[in-house]
Amino acid sequence: MTRTRTAAARSGALGLGVQGASPPHETGRAETVYRDIHLAIVEHRLSPGTRLPEAHLAHVFGVSRTLVRQALQHLAHDHLVVLEPNRGARIAEPSIDEVRQLYEVRRLIECNMLAEGASRITRARLAALRRKVASEAQANARGDTLASMQLAGAFHLDLAEALGNRILVDILGELIARGNVAIALYEQRGRDICRCDEHRQIVRLLVAGETAAAVSALRRHLLEIGESLTAARPPRGPVNLREVLGRAPVKPARKDRRAS
């Protein structure tokens, strides 16, 4: 998915830019709910299959169920949450076989397209890719797990855009979103999600005109990511969403005695 379409989808999920949309301050609160839940998933504080009741989350965050619903729709768009009719939301549970198949498809598409289109990548695009890798490194250094994962996916999307194939960008955007679910749920703690050195090596080989080596590095990079996600973490018992999401209890509104 291109950046434009991603932004549009995100805006739609959070009620932006549409008739009857939420006011800006409410949109910001929905974004906070989205980001906090997203980060809890990425940091393995919420397990696959965990239920996310709207009413309970509304109380935890001190917002309306409407805003919680907008945040959950955004998470569903990211494939991190599944919305089930009459059952509510739960964190996605991709199987190990689905993860393997996903990265098999990514290797097939990304590596073949890079092999055929590397000559179309301009110096300006290569410079932009270098800056993207630098941003990844900075996110890692400051311990921003969510930004690290998002920038890692953005690197691959930017590389696809540099090849000049818009269809590839659309397809890859969907695959990366699904891959982020697997990373968030099955990545072993302590591993470098961004793998900045591997991204840096791919760019360095492209700059040097060593296309075959760059393709091999990309294939190895995707293979290692997929293989690192083949051990499901043991299931956990019920979780306290307020405790996991780090939220203080919501205080009841004080009554104005003069109005009573």
Image (cartoon, grey):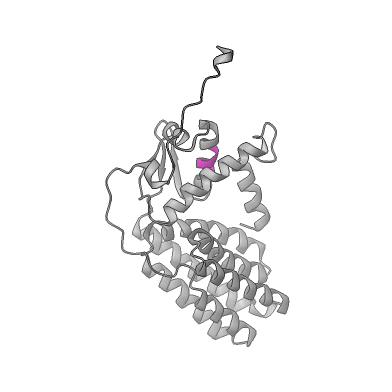
Specify the segment rendered in magenta: 69-74
Q: Which residue extends farthest top?
A: 260
The answer to whether 248 is drawn above or below residue 35 in the figure is above
**Could you say which quadrant of the image residue 55 lies in?**
top left
The reply to whether residue 15 is visible in this rendering is: no
Q: Is residue 144 above or below residue 118?
A: above
**Residue 195 covered by magenta stretch:** no
Seen in the image, is 92 located left or right of residue 155?
left
Q: Nearer the viewer, residue 207 or 14?
A: 14
Residue 258 or residue 237, whichever sits in front: 258
Task: Indicate the position of residue 219 as horizontal and vertical percent values.
Answer: 48, 76
Residue 68 percent coordinates (x, y) = 51, 37
Give the residue at x 59% y 75%: 114
Residue at 54% from the left image edge and 75% from the top image edge: 199
163 with respect to 57 (left or right): right
Residue at position x 53%, y 85% in the image: 213
What predominant SS class does the magenta segment belong to?
helix
Count all numbered tags in the image, as a single digit.
0
Q: Is residue 79 above or below residue 122?
A: above
User: Is residue 154 visible to us here?
Assistant: yes
Q: Position of residue 238 (x, y in %)?
A: 29, 43
